Image (tube, grey):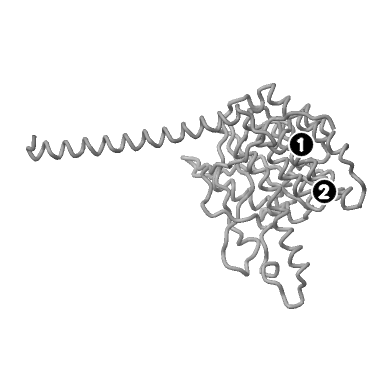
Amino acid sequence: MTEKEHRTPNILATKEKQMPEKKQMPKETQMTKEQQIPKENQTAKETQTAESAVYEGNLWDEILKAIVDTMPEQLFPLFKEVYGKEYPKGTSIVLLNTETSTFWENREGPPESTLMDIALLVDGTDYYHLECQMKDNQEMVIRMFAYDVHFAITHTKVVDGETKEITLKFPHSVVIYPEGSDSIPDHLQCRILFQDNTEHIYRLPIVRVQKYSLEEIREKHLILFLPYTMLRFRPRLRKGKNITEKELTEYLNEVILILEEEVAAGRLTDLQYHDCVRLLRNAAERVFAKHRELWKEVDRMTAPLIKLPTHEFRELEAELASQKEKYEAEITKQKAEIQRLQEKLRLAGVN
């Protein structure tokens, strides 16, 4: 493989954005008591499999959340793809509270709460709800309906001042399936019958990431799909089919080239580029967990083997700026205390 110098990826540091302090896993990834506590007839392998399933779901959810948290504008191409809605660069994006009750899912247990994956307000008027789902599940449409009802009550309820009529507006919802499966439908749908004999078809679009080629991702700027593209190697690995280092190298070069083009076009910053590479590594490490030679190739191409002086300078500059801010805040605090004491002495008549 030809040696190629790539930007050095930084470790992703996700910022908190008005989210509940205690974050629970989505219901489908929470471990049941049966999974948490091995039964007498449950083998260690079965317990390990249950724990692995929890980690599996969390990883792909967290990749989406990390992208939304650090570079939410990367959702704009997705909104255009699914809903035909375009937003200019700089459009405001607000992350909303995603906590909802799970009582409807388990009426036998104590009241608890869970979190929707992503809830957003874009441009001050448009509401979006995104869920990341790994496996086909017939109950998914019911979960989405329950989430969207709670979303509307929490965020979009409007009461008419004269008639007192309440209006609930559902968000633009979409379910993202990172892993390919022939059983996944083109949309989710549920027929709802009301007590007055009227009915409504609750219908949701879905996105199957593995249907998009790298060329389509490049053309449509669907950068948030790139970490998930590592999953397209999984079916072949499970069937024992060979994946050569050359094939993997060429694939990674293509992915990195797409990211570099986005940086050159101003659609990604250097820091966001580093974050995308880091997430790509997270995905690859999971997919190639049992195929260490392939993981080593990914690691070789994306790991920060050499830290350039420019990157060291930027890190030092950021650290000094942070320290300066702390010192200035302390100086301001001390000056205020001195003024307070001076005023106290003045009032006491002490020169």
Q: Is residue 102 above or below residue 42?
A: above
For the C terminus, the image quarter is top left
Of circles 1 and 2, which is in front? 1
Mark number displayed over residue 301: 1
Q: Residue 263 location, x and y as percent? A: 68, 25
Q: Is residue 204 left or right of residue 12?
A: right
Q: Is residue 96 left or right of residue 291?
A: left
Circle 2 packing at 10 Å, graded few (<14), some (14-19), many (20+), is: some
Q: Is residue 337 above or below residue 2?
A: below
- As helix, strand or loop, the secondary structure at mark 1 comes to helix
Q: Residue 224 location, x and y as percent? A: 71, 37
What kind of residue is marked 2?
A: Ile
Q: Is residue 187 left or right of residue 315?
A: right
CA distance for labels 1 and 2: 33 Å
Q: Residue at x 40, y 37 (%)?
A: 326
- As helix, strand or loop, the secondary structure at mark 2 comes to loop
Q: Residue at x 58, y 46 (%)?
A: 152
For the N terminus, the image quarter is top right
Whether residue 75 is visible to the viewer of this picture, yes or no, is no
Of 58 and 142, nearer the camera is 58
Residue on which the image places disc 2: 184
